[in-house]
Image (cartoon, rainbow, N blue to C red):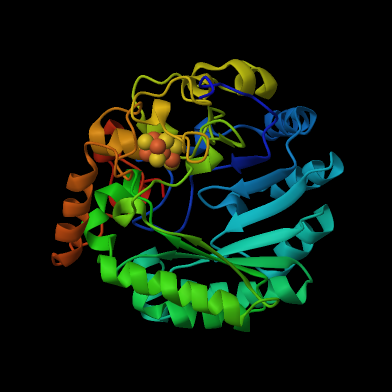
Amino acid sequence: MNAPTNPVGPPLALLAELTHRCPLGCPYCSNPLTLDRVRDELDTATWLRVIDEAASLGVLQIHFSGGEPLVRRDLATLIGHARKVGLYTNLITSAVLLDAPRLESLKAAGLEHVQISFQDTDPANADRIALYEGGHEKKLAAARMVRAAGLALTINAVMHRQNLAHLPEMIALALDLGAGRLEVAHVQYYGWALANRQSLIPPREEVRAAVQAVAEARERLKGQLVIDHVVPDYYARRPKACMGGWAQQFLNIAPSGLVLPCHAAQGIPGLRFDSVKERSLGEIWTHSEAFTRFRGTSWMPEPCRSCDRREIDFGGCRCQAMALTGDAGATDPACELSPHHARLFETASAESAAVPREFTYRRYAKTPREEELPAEELPV
Ligand code: SF4
Ligand code: FES
């Protein structure tokens, strides 16, 4: 057997989280529980420099995300610059703030692809999940505008026990809107989603039915719609290769400038993240403590260390290992070789059978000063 390794090539894609501000409050948001404030956000000049560094490093795609990236007034400037230095540009948005003039300006700047999230196909349930009245209708209109503008469209559908029954309708909606791709992404349980797990996790039979429905739709819609499927691995026998392996393909920049190997990495205590304000992106990618800590295979404990799949799934997800075992360096409990695997399955079965709780919606924590302010003076 070969010795475990720590290889490092160039990253494929950069997720640029421009802001944590967002008009929606989805209870499974992938942003951290402690959200960056507007005063913490990187300024335009720093983002332009970072985009240059990403292109020099070999990054091919940039995904402008948030929070809601449309709240940044410099979005067109950043998209234009990314395009100029040869990056493929994608906007990941809820689209409730997207109107025709804004879309026109982003397209003129060089935007190539738009990904719009849908919470459900039932408007009332969608708006309840997003905590945004009238949002579903706005998304439908925005998706049609994107296609009319000739831009590529992906629909992102985060699925859970409170919308999974509408999966066939979601596939039909993506087709109707003219999307080229549909991401059926079951909730992954970190951060906000972990806090809402009991309200979100579907029973195993429903997950199996969804897997079958996606397989059938893929066959039926070959050449018309590409369907990606992220399955919840609480019911799996082996974990997913989260992020294609820690620090192997992707980097994330949080609104404040911290560079993360994945969107949920700040949930791992004791890991030190570098900022683009202090080091170049290239140095951080190659040398920073957070990126090198779990890169490759040499950090692995048993059973991963001597497992044939160690360079296929890279031991699963570090954030899930942290959330479920308290040790980010443990084998992901989604793996049946983990000593925690049986408990994971039992938890999933029990929670999915229980009555769902009220959602804990994503929102900013109040600072001590804000605790004293009247509601109308609070930040969003
Ligand atoms: Fe993957 Fe580790 Fe499980 Fe092997 S033991 S399948 S490397 S998580
Ligand atoms: Fe962080 Fe999987 S979400 S490694």
The quadrant of the picture showing ligand 2 is top left
Residue 12 drawn above or below residue 215: above
Residue 125 drawn above or below residue 345: below
**Residue 5 appears in which quarter of the rendering?**
top right
- Return the residue nearer the eye: 373 or 40: 40
**Horizontal and vertical percent position of residue 350:** 14, 59
**Horizontal and vertical percent position of residue 276:** 62, 23
Identify which residue is drawn at 36% across, 52% down: 233
Q: Tell me: 39 left or right of 235.
A: right
Identify which residue is drawn at 46% across, 81% down: 168
Identify which residue is drawn at 41% across, 21% down: 271
- Return the residue nearer the eye: 74 or 247: 247
- Return the residue nearer the eye: 47 or 230: 230
**Horizontal and vertical percent position of residue 205:** 28, 71
Q: Is residue 120 something one can see in this rendering?
A: no
Q: Residue furthest front?
A: 1
Identify which residue is drawn at 25% across, 48% down: 195
Q: Tell me: 198 left or right of 265.
A: left
